[in-house]
Amino acid sequence: MSEIVFEGVSHDFGAERVVDDVSLVLTERRVGIVGANGSGKSTLARMINGLVSPTGGRVLVDGLDVSRRAREVRRRVGFVFTNADNQIVMPTVREDVAFTLRRHRLEKADAAARVDAILERLGLTDLADRPAHRLSGGQKQLLALASVLVAEPEVLVADEPTTLLDARNARLIARHFEGLDQQLIVVSHQLELLESFDRVVVMEHGRVVADDVPSVALDAYRVLIA
Amino acid sequence: MIGVFHPGTSIVHRAPALVKLGLLAAFVTVVALVGSLAWLAAASVLVLLLFVLARVPARLAVRQVVPILWVLAFAVPVQVVFGGWEAAAIMAVRLLIAVALAALYTLTTPVSATLDGMQALLRPFGRWVDADRVGLALALTIRCVPLLADLVREVMEARRARGAEGSLLALAVPVIVRALRTAEHLGEALTARGFDD
């Protein structure tokens, strides 16, 4: 597993401090991050991929400073967004998955084999030539996941990946998450998704207020929002 | 190009995108220069044969051409009045051939093949033009059409639900704000996928 380190990390958005002096070392296979809206959890997750830079402290992935070596870090860390529509670029499912590999300069046959393998793994083979923007919400999120996994990242960060989905599709995505080999960092409001995780971090007003196994941390969160 | 690709293994499908684009440009140019209805009729038969060769279902082919019929419904009567029936017929057939050929290209060519072709075409000019960047810009342009169409539809529904159907402001403001936000999210997603330079 990769080692993700937050060293006294803060982030200011204008005059507002959204992440406040957070220090964490994440080495577990599956880590959940929960918190109310505006608690800073999504900002924290974005820092792992370098989408947001800390205004104080630093974030390291396997010793690489994310702010200084973002490109290298992004090859290791994939990111799945809440709204898959914002992540889809190409018109068809197969083309969108293949699009990720354009920067990897693979041989055409190797790239096609990787695309086919990931489509099959996520049950998207039958949809491969369908227009991506006409898929259902669950299928779009699976496509977003496939587009990230085809690059074979070591870490997958997902920011509320099931928030826009119905219960059945949320369960489908959760099932696929369970089968992943990658280290997984998931930001979610859906607590049942995180119950089987190894560790859950609870955020409130930009600070970590609980950090434990799910049974303890999720109870602390339930008390917090009661 | 907005997801109308019809997969297949015909010779039309297998032909390189750049060859198809070149032939498309040449054919449309010739058709634009030909002033004889008889020759245009022959060209129309050739286009029909290409559709048959590509094994594109008739209904799918017709659907691509229908939008231009609306344009012709207005343009042809005007042309008849000012240029006579023959000029109107020539203009209509030329337009139909051009649209049908462009549709045949999009039906038989995945966007990624077009991007690869464009990048290959631009690579010799790498000192002046970033081929990858042009390819990405083209892909994003194509992607933004259905994205913006969905956005406008949602805002129009919301406007109707609030009883503000006639208000241009109630359409323009949320569409612009959401379009800018969507662009920001799309940029963020591209960065996360490694397209960050």
Image: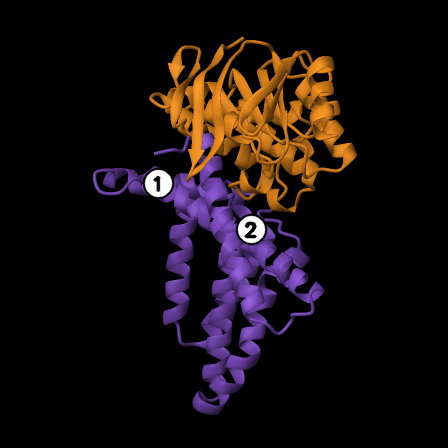
Chain colours: A orange, B purple
| Residue drawn at (58%, 48%) of the image | B3
Query: Does residue A66 appear in this view?
Result: no
Residue shown at 74% from the left, 33% from the top: A169
**Residue under pointer 2:** B147
Answer few, some or many: residues within 10 Å of disc 1's Cα (few below 14, many 20 plus, some between 14 and 19): few
- Answer with left or right where residue B61 lies relative to residue A173: left
* Residue at 68% in and 33% down: A162
* Image spot of residue B122 (x, y percent): 30, 42
Q: Residue A184 lies in what quarter of the image?
A: top right
SS at mark 1?
helix
Q: Secondary structure at mark 2?
A: helix
Residue at the extreme bottom of the image, as rendered? B81
Whether residue A216 is visible, yes or no, is yes
Residue B131 location in percent, x, y? 32, 40
Q: Quadrant of residue A129?
A: top right
In this view, A57 is above or below B84: above
Label 1 – label 2 distance at C-alpha? 20 Å
User: Which tag, 1 or 2, sits closer to the chain's start?
Assistant: 1
Q: Nearer the viewer, mark 1 or mark 2?
A: 2
Instruction: Tell me which residue sits at (37%, 23%) in the image.
Output: A67
Image position, residue B60 (x, y; %): 65, 56
- Subunit under mark 1: B
**Which residue matches tag 1?**
B133
Question: Where B31 sits versus A122, above or below?
Answer: below
Tag 2: Cα neighbours inside 10 Å, few (<14), some, or many (≥20)? some
Q: Chain of mark 2?
A: B
Residue lying farthest to the right in this orientation: A168
